[in-house]
Image (spheres, grey):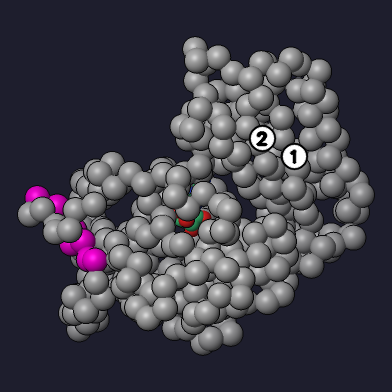
Amino acid sequence: MASQTPKSHSFQVFRDVPPLRQLRQQLLRSDRTVGLVPTMGALHEGHLSLIRQAAAENTDVFVSIYVNPTQFGVNEDLESYPRTWDSDIEKIEKLNAELASHGQGNGVKGSSTTPGRVTAILAPTSKVMYPTLPPTSEIHGYGSFVTITPLATKLEGASRPVFFRGVATVCMKLFNIVTPDRVYFGQKDVQQTVIIRRMVQDFHLGTEVKIGTTVREHDGLAMSSRNVYLGDRRRAVGLVLYSALKAAENAFESGKVSRADILGAANEVAQKVLAAQKALSPSERALFEVDYISLADPDDLTELEVVDRTRGAILSGAVKMLPLEESSPEENRGLGDGKVPVRLIDNLIFKPKV
Ligand code: AMP
C-alpha cells in the first residue's frame, strides 16, 4: 500500500488521525460538508454508487478503506479477504474525474449545482485503529467494544457472533475520527444499516445515516467483494438466493401477508434448485446450504408471523456456497480455485404503505 499520496492524485491519503482531523477542521471552517463512506476496499459498483450519492449530497467525500480484523471470526477469511489497493485508488480517481465532468467538484453547500468529490481516503493501520490493545476476534477477548444487542445477535449475528461487535466498534471509531455530516451504507447489508442507525440514535452521534440501494449484476446477483471467489459454476447457482427472495416478494405483492405463504415461496425455490444440483454429478454441480431466510420487522428485526403493511418488513437471507467437490483446471473456478466457501447475503425491503 502506498504510504504517501502521489502528487497526481485528486485526493489525499491519510494513514493516521491527526492530519485528517486538521483537514476536517479546515472544511468545517469553510462551511463544507463531509459524507463518509466506510469500506473494506476491493471496490465495485456498489461502493462507487454510495460514493456518488455522498458526492451529490456533500462538498467532500471521505472514503475509508480498512479491512477490520475484529469483525472477522477466528475461522473466517481475514487473511484471504481481497485487497486491491491500486485498482481501488484508480477507481476513485476515475470517479472523481466523472464527478468533475458533471460540473461537480467541491462547490459550496447550498449552491444550485450539487457539488462534491472524494477529497480524502482514510486507510489507517491497525495500530492506528486499535491504539492500545491489539484487535481481537475472541468473543471474550479484551478491548473497547461497542455492542448493540439484541440486534447484533440475530440473523448474520447468529452464525457470526463477533461480526456486528466488530462493525459497530470500527464504525464508532471512524465516526469519531471523521465527524461526518452524513454516513453512507448499502442496503445490501441490511442488518448493518439497522444496527448503525440504532448506534447513532442510542449514542446521540451527530451524523445522518443514509442508505444506498443494492447494486446488482445484470441477472440480479448482488455485487460483493467476495464474489470473486465464486467462479462460473457457483456464480450461476448462487443466484438462487435472489430468485428465492424475488419469489417471496411476488407472493407478498400478490396479496399474501403470512410468514408461511411468503417464506414458503422462497423455500420452495431454494429446495428446487438444491434438488436439481444434487441430481448432477460432483463435477457438474455446486451445492449450497441455506443459513436463513427471514421475514423481520424493519426496526427491531424480530421475526414476523404476519406482515403489517403499514410497517413493512425486511426479507433477507444467507446462503453458503460450498467448495466445489470436483473441478477441472479448464473451468473458471474463481479466486482460491473453488475451494473457498462463499457466504452470500441479500435482501428485499417491503416498504410500508400508508
Ligand atoms: P464492504 O466493503 O463490503 O464492507 O462494504 C462497504 C459498504 O458498501 C457497505 O455499506 C456495504 O453495504 C456497501 N455495499 C456493498 N455491496 C454493495 C452493493 N452491491 N450495493 C450497494 N452497496 C453495497
Task: Confirm or deny contact between disc 1 and disc 2 (CB under 8 A).
Answer: yes
Task: Identify the disc placed on residue 253.
Answer: none
For the question of whether residue 27 can be seen, the reply is: no
Q: Secondary structure at mark 2?
A: loop
Which residue carries the number 1 mark? Answer: 289
Residue 186, image x, y percentages: 51, 56
**Residue drawn where x is 36% and y is 72% of the image:** 129
For the question of whether residue 329 can be seen, the reply is: yes
In the depicted structure, whether residue 337 falls above or below residue 289: above
Within the magenta stretch, is there residue 122?
no
The first of marks 1 and 2 along the sequence is: 1
Q: Main secondary structure of the magenta part?
A: loop
Residue nearest the viewer, comparing 336 with 50: 336
Within the magenta stretch, is there residue 11?
yes
Q: Quadrant of the C terminus?
A: bottom right
Q: Is mark 2 within 8 Å of ligand 1?
A: no
**Residue drawn where x is 60% and y is 39% of the image:** 341
Is the residue marked by circle 2 packed among few (<14), some (14-19), or many (20+) residues within 10 Å? some
Task: Identify the disc placed on residue 322.
Answer: 2
Residue 267, image x, y percentages: 83, 40
Residue 279, image x, y percentages: 81, 18
Instruction: State left or right for residue 18 relative to residue 199.
Output: left
**Extent of the magenta region:** 8-15
Q: Amino acid at mark 1?
A: Glu
In the depicted structure, whether residue 107 falls above or below residue 267: below
Q: Amino acid at mark 2?
A: Leu
Residue nearest the viewer, comparing 287 with 248: 287
